[in-house]
Image: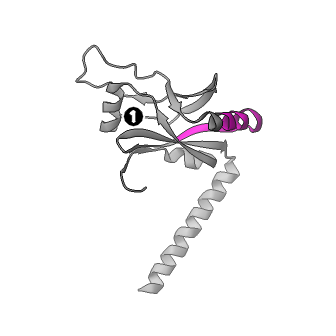
């Protein structure tokens, strides 16, 4: 990623389980104590997903750990979070999700100019043979790179 961007967490499992057709950069609406937990990297999102409700996109199943230093003003770790996108993007995403069976999966959480951003992927689930083909292709690329390195020595 470019300058001024600090990666918080990546969803590697999503790249294995889904084929990603499009990705969108979204802002995320957070409470103050949630931002502190993001800065500490205390988030968990292996099974998180997003859905379109009433023209807004909501992120579900994202666990943000409570901050031990904030007393009674702590947040609910399981609350759904609203993602910030343009209306045209939301309409386009809603059409694809409803018609073609796509799923919205968070791929990467990162800071950009001090603000938390989410890379949201428009994904379709892979079948078992697709996963095997992906692994085979990955191994082949690794072998080619290894052979190329040995020949350069």
Q: Quadrant of the C terminus?
A: bottom left
In the displayed structure, 36 sits above or below 132; it is above
Q: Main secondary structure of the magenta part?
A: helix
Is 5 in front, or is 12? Answer: 5
- Give the residues drawn in magenta, as a range: 91-106
Q: Is residue 70 left or right of residue 38?
A: left
Whole-percent x, y for residue 101 in the image: 73, 37
Query: Which residue of the protein is positioned furthest toward the left in this rendering?
Result: 69
Is 64 in front, or is 137? Answer: 64
Query: Which residue of the protein is positioned furthest toward the top in this rendering?
Result: 72
**Residue at the spot of label 1:** 43
In the displayed structure, 68 sits above or below 19; it is above
Residue that appears at 37% across and 55% down: 3
In the displayed structure, 3 sits above or below 34; it is below
Q: Is residue 3 magenta?
A: no
Question: Badge 1: few (under 14), some or many (20 or more) residues near its Cα, within 10 Å?
Answer: some
Q: How many marks?
A: 1
Q: Quadrant of the N terminus?
A: bottom left
């Amino acid at each position: 990623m470019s300058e001024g961007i600090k990666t918080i967490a990546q969803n590697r499992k999503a790249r294995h389980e889904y084929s990603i057709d499009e990705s969108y950069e979204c802002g995320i609406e957070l409470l103050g104590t949630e931002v502190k937990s993001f800065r500490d990297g205390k988030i968990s999102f292996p099974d998180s997903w997003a859905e379109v409700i009433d023209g807004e996109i909501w992120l579900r199943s994202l666990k943000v750990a409570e901050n031990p230093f904030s007393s009674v003003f702590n947040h609910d770790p399981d609350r759904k979070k609203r993602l910030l996108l343009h209306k045209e993007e939301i309409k386009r995403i809603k059409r694809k999700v409803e018609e073609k069976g796509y799923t919205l999966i968070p791929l990467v959480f990162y800071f950009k100019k001090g603000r938390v951003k989410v890379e949201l992927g428009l994904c379709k689930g892979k079948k078992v043979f697709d996963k095997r083909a992906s692994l085979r292709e990955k191994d082949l690329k690794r072998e080619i790179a290894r052979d190329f390195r040995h020949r350069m020595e």
